[in-house]
Structure formats: C-alpha cells, structure tokens
Amino acid sequence: MPHLAGVWRSEGEGMDQSRILLIVRQFWENAIKLLLEDPKNARDLLALCGADIVKRIDLRRVKLIQTTFVERDYRHVESDVVLLAPLRRERGERTAKHLLIYILIEHQSEPDRLMPLRSLDYVVQIFKYQVREWSKTHRTLARIRLHPVLPVVFYTGTQRWDSVGRLVDLVEMGERFESATPAMEPRFINLPVIAAETLEAQGGFFGWVLRLIQQRKTRPREFQRLLNRVVQHPETMPQAERRRWLELLSYVMALVYHAREPSEWPDLQQAIEASVRTDEHRQEVFEMRRTIADELEERGAIRNRQQTLIRQLKRRFGDLPDELSSTIRATNDPEQLDEWLDQVVTAKTLKEVGIEVPA
C-alpha cells in the first residue's frame, strides 16, 4: 500500500513559518514543487492538461505520495511530485475493482533534451515501486497487476520549448532502432503558450497564480495590474482552505522579490496588502512579508560572505579549483563561512584554510 503524505493537516490551520522559508529558499527550483504537493493545486494543474485520460481521473480524491523516484543521476534537477488517484471506469469496462493511477508531475524551468529519458526512468521507478509494495504483502508476483502511470511535464521557463521530444530522436541511427527503443509520450503543459483565458477559466485558484508566473517579465504597470487581480482571487477561497490561501499568497510575495526589480517592491507589496479584506488575514500577510524579507536579508549576507571568501582565497592562493568554489557557494552556515574567513588570514596554504570538498 503506498505511503501517502500527511503534510496536509486540517485545511483551516495556518501555515508554518518553515513552509514559507521552504518556498523562499531555492525559489526557482523548489517553490512550484511545494505548491504542487497540495493535491488541490495539482488538481487545478491537471485540469489544464487537455488529455482524455485526465477526464477519467477522480481529481477530488488525489493523494500525494511522500517519496521521490528521482535516481541519483538526476538529483541535481529533482523536482518531481507523484500523486495517486482513483480512475473512473467507463460504462461496460471490465477491470480491477479498485483502479488507481499514478500521476508523475515533473516541473521544468528550462528545456531539457534528456527529458524523454528522464521521464522514462521515473515511470520505470514507479512501476518498480509498485512491485516492491506488492512483495511486502504477497509471497509471489504471479498475480500482480501494475497500476498505470501518467507522466506530466510542466514547463514554466521563458525559452521556447515546443515539445518534450522522443527518446528515439536521442539515439544514434534511431530510425533504424525505433521498434527496439522505448516509446512514451508525457503530457506536456507548456505554460508560456497557454491562453490567459484558459488559465483563469479552467485552472482554478492555482491557475491565477500561474497567470502571474507566465507574465512575470512583463512591464511594471501591466504586472501590477495583473497582480491586483491575482491576489484578490484567492481571497475568495473558503475558510476551510485558509492554509492553501496562505501558501499561494506567500508564493506570490516571494515571486515579487525574485522576479521583479527592487524599485518595484514597495508598490507591489502594498498592492498585495491592500487586497486583503480582514484584519486577521492582514496580520498574516504582514508576518509573511517580514519572514520573507528577513530570509532574503540573511541569504544576501551569506552570499556576501561566500563572495568575500572566494575573492580573498584567490588573492592569497591564485585560481581556485571549481570543486572548491562550488563547495563555498553551497555552504549556507554563516559561522562556518566566518571560520574559513578567519583562517585565510593566517593560512600559509589553501589546505590550511580547512575547506573540505565532498568526494
């Protein structure tokens, strides 16, 4: 039996500060994935898929699988969300009593030629996961039947990407080996080309946030007008979805800081606060804004330490190995960075600074 995530507690609960920080940190890599871990946001996204099979999925009963199927080779681009949902039978269809479907959503912020291979690998891992789960409660695999897997590639980047492509196109002399090469066609949700009317009409509350992501590079006045519309829409959410509202709004606030110029921040944050209708929600927005601002200030201070350390090391010891520079940039502990900076003053060799590069 799949292990379903328990992160979504009572919908009426407020959001932990830790969730805000997770959205702000490594924003472009992780924030969308965190939003899609809410089954309601995933449901809104899948409504944009346009595939006939999606119409058969009971999107009201989507559950999150709390594990990852990303192999070590792809951990640097890990952004997968795996869901499980019942699949409705068609009239007269004879199949298992409880038919389920696994939904793999892979978020991409830039095109990837290897996406056909990655998608295939993820799907195989989910099938192997089902075999392992079956083996825990059955002595034999003789009667095992695997649940289908629907791979979805969700693209939010700014570069043109017309299709995911085929694995056979990556293979040398692929046309001669087409019959021997696995073929799979992930559903492709290409955000840059989806019409605004579609996002607003079919994408639910999440669709409005996607609209803002889509237009994140537009001119300041146009962006602010759109922001005013977007932040007012989730405000109409029922109280039972207050936690989801907080997450969507915290994402919007973080998007402002990451995608817009600092000169625009005051007016945009004022627009967000003006959209809030109750004192309780206004206080929550104020606390989110303060948390995000504090985190960004701390991240900025850490980046300054990292840059200073690299600059001082180069002055003392010349060009640095790429692995060493990467280790410094990946270190977010301010005390550790300060310790290394102190060592630079007295160290006679690069090794004496004490920066250990992972193997």
Image (cartoon, rainbow, N blue to C red):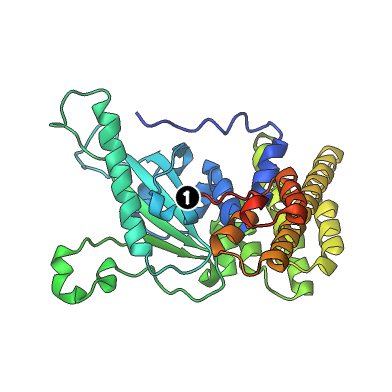
- Residue 75: x and y in percent read 45, 51
- Residue 63: x and y in percent read 46, 37
Three-letter amino acid code at the position of disc 1: Ala
Query: What residue is drawn where x is 69% and y is 74%?
Result: 218
Q: Residues within 10 Å of mark 1 (few under 14, many from 20)?
A: few
Which residue is the site of mark 1? 359
Q: Is residue 105 left or right of residue 109?
A: left
The vertical placement of 228 against 192, above or below, is above
Query: What residue is drawn where x is 21% and y is 42%?
Result: 92
Q: Quadrant of residue 291?
A: top right
Q: Quadrant of residue 113?
A: bottom left
337 or 348: which is nearer to us? Answer: 348
Residue 245 visible? The answer is no
Q: Is residue 204 left or right of residue 168?
A: right
Quadrant in which the N terminus appears: top left
115 or 206: which is nearer to us? Answer: 115
- Residue 109: x and y in percent read 53, 64
Residue at disc 1, secondary structure: loop
306 or 282: which is nearer to us? Answer: 306
Query: What residue is drawn where x is 71% and y is 57%?
Result: 306
Q: Give the mark count.
A: 1
Residue 271 visible? The answer is yes
